[in-house]
Image: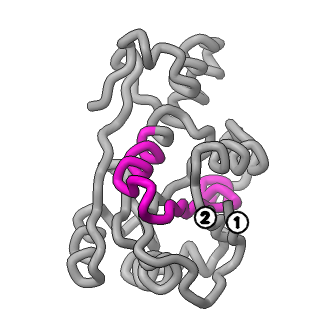
């Protein structure tokens, strides 16, 4: 797995399948995104992930930074095992926070990763002030030649698997539910659903 920390200023992949997000904790929702990428790539296209350090929430409000669910090292080990070909950990700073959605698409998805497909959650937002949406991403895809594939939320016993939800479970002492949202122990038992 190739790890990129700063903008390489050149194209690194050709016709890649890309997913974007914080990926804090790599819970079942994140795992569903990765699995969709693998399915779409079908072992014929490179898999890439764009993620951020520090986490945007920690950068915007350092005094109220969310508790990390996983270290960067743990995240990278998981992603290597999951078959990602490239992980780009973008430095979240003022320049990135100020980048508009269209510029992000051009400079990241098009110029560096040559995205053929982009996989995101249905509620995905990006760019300055979270101005970018899946609708904008679809429009950009039409212009730049990539398709957008959205993944429904993963639910465990009716509760959406999310980093914030796992933090709430941990704060409430519900370690079992936190573990189920993170590890998917019930995946084979039918307690987990998409939608």
* Residue pointed to by mark 1: 3
Would you say residue 43 sits in the magenta stretch? yes
Mark closest to the chain's N terminus, 2 or 1: 1
Residue 195 higher or lower than 111, as above or below: above
The disc at residue 42 is: none
Q: What residue is pinned by disc 2?
A: 86
SS assignment at label 2? strand
Tell me what residue is drawn at x 24 percent, y 83 percent. 143
Classify residue 91 by image quadrant.
bottom right
Check disc 2: other Cα within 10 Å, few if <14, some if 14-19, many if 20+.
Answer: many
Q: Position of residue 73 (x, y in %)?
A: 78, 48
User: Helix, strand, or loop for circle 1?
Assistant: strand
* Quadrant of the snapshot with the N terminus: bottom right
| Quadrant of residue 140 within the rendered picture | bottom left
Taking the spot 37% from the left edge, 25% from the top edge, the residue there is: 155
Name above or below for residue 131 compared with residue 100: above
The residue stretch that appears in magenta: 32-60
Quick check: 20 above or below 131?
A: above
Q: Residues within 10 Å of mark 1 (few under 14, many from 20)?
A: some
Q: Are marks 2 and 1 in contact (CB under 8 Å)?
A: yes
Visible residue check, residue 65: no
Place of residue 42 in the rendered image (x, y in percent of width and height, measured from the top left): 39, 53
Which residue is located at x 50 percent, y 60 percent? Answer: 47
The residue depicted at 68 percent of the width and 36 percent of the height is 69
């Amino acid at each position: 797995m190739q790890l990129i920390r700063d903008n390489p200023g050149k194209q690194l992949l050709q016709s890649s399948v890309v997913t974007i997000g914080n990926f804090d904790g790599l819970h079942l929702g994140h795992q569903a995104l990765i699995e969709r990428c693998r399915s779409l790539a079908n072992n014929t296209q490179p898999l890439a992930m764009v993620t951020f350090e520090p986490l945007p929430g920690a950068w915007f409000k350092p005094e109220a930074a969310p508790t990390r669910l996983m270290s960067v090292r743990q995240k990278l080990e998981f992603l290597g095992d999951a078959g990602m070909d490239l992980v780009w950990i973008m430095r979240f700073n003022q320049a990135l926070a100020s980048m508009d959605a269209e510029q992000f698409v051009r400079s990241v998805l098009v110029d560096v990763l040559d995205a053929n497909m982009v996989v995101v959650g249905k509620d995905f937002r990006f760019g300055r002030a979270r101005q970018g949406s899946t609708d904008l991403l679809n429009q950009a895809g039409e212009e730049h030649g990539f398709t957008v594939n959205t993944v429904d939320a993963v639910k465990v016993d009716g509760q959406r698997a999310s980093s914030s939800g796992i933090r709430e479970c941990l704060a409430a002492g519900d370690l079992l539910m936190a573990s189920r949202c993170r590890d998917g122990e019930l995946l084979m038992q039918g307690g987990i659903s998409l939608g």
